[in-house]
């Protein structure tokens, strides 16, 4: 679900970048997936390929970096990467956590094909 929204948003962002810069198409894009909800990078790649069909992003190479959320237990101060929607501290079992995450989708680099 989160993969679909992010993949659609990436295609729209790339469409706007191509139009703004007067490019022909997208050759490659590198993104970082973050956010508090875990995203399957393989599903994201497949959905990007699907949504890019018939657009200026069709055939573009997609490189994905993952930036999983981080949690710190407010009780014992243990830091860890949560792996589900209701995480608990692996040290003391507390659910009193501070969860931080990078933005859910960051475009790190884009390579465009420009007219000759």
Image (cartoon, helix red, strand yellow):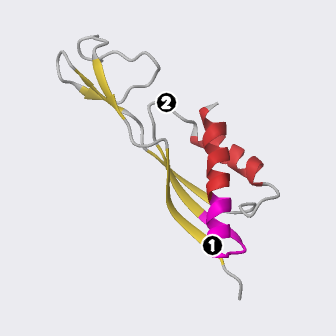
Which sits earlier in the primary sequence, circle 1 or circle 2? 2
- Residue shown at 50% from the left, 32% from the top: 38
Q: Quadrant of the N terminus?
A: top right
Disc ID at residue 57? none
Q: Residues within 10 Å of mark 1 (few under 14, many from 20)?
A: many
The residue most toward the left is 76
Residue of label 2: 37
Q: Using the image as rendered, state which of residue 21 and residue 111 is in the foreground.
A: 21
Q: How far across and down, in percent of the image, does residue 109 sit?
A: 51, 64
Q: How far across and down, in percent of the image, does residue 7 sit?
A: 64, 45
- Residue shown at 67% from the left, 76% from the top: 22
In the visual, does 40 lie left or right of 12? left
- Residue shown at 68% from the left, 60% from the top: 15
Q: Is residue 76 above or below residue 109?
A: above
Q: How far across and down, in percent of the image, does residue 63 sit?
A: 56, 57
Residue of label 1: 112
Q: Is residue 30 above or below residue 3?
A: below
Q: Over which residues does the magenta segment extend?
A: 14-28
- Residue shown at 49% from the left, 30% from the top: 37
Q: Using the image as rendered, state which of residue 110 and residue 22 is in the foreground.
A: 22
């Amino acid at each position: 679900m989160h993969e679909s929204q992010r993949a659609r948003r990436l295609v729209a962002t790339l469409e706007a970048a191509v139009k703004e810069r007067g490019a022909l198409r997208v050759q490659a894009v590198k993104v970082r997936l973050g956010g508090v909800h875990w995203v399957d990078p393989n599903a994201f790649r497949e959905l990007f390929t699907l949504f890019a069909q018939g657009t200026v992003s069709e055939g573009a190479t997609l490189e994905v970096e993952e930036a999983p959320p981080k949690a710190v237990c407010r009780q014992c101060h243990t830091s860890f990467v949560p792996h589900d929607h209701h995480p608990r501290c692996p040290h003391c079992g507390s659910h009193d956590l501070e969860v931080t995450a990078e933005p859910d989708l960051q475009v790190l680099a884009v390579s465009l094909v420009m007219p000759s």
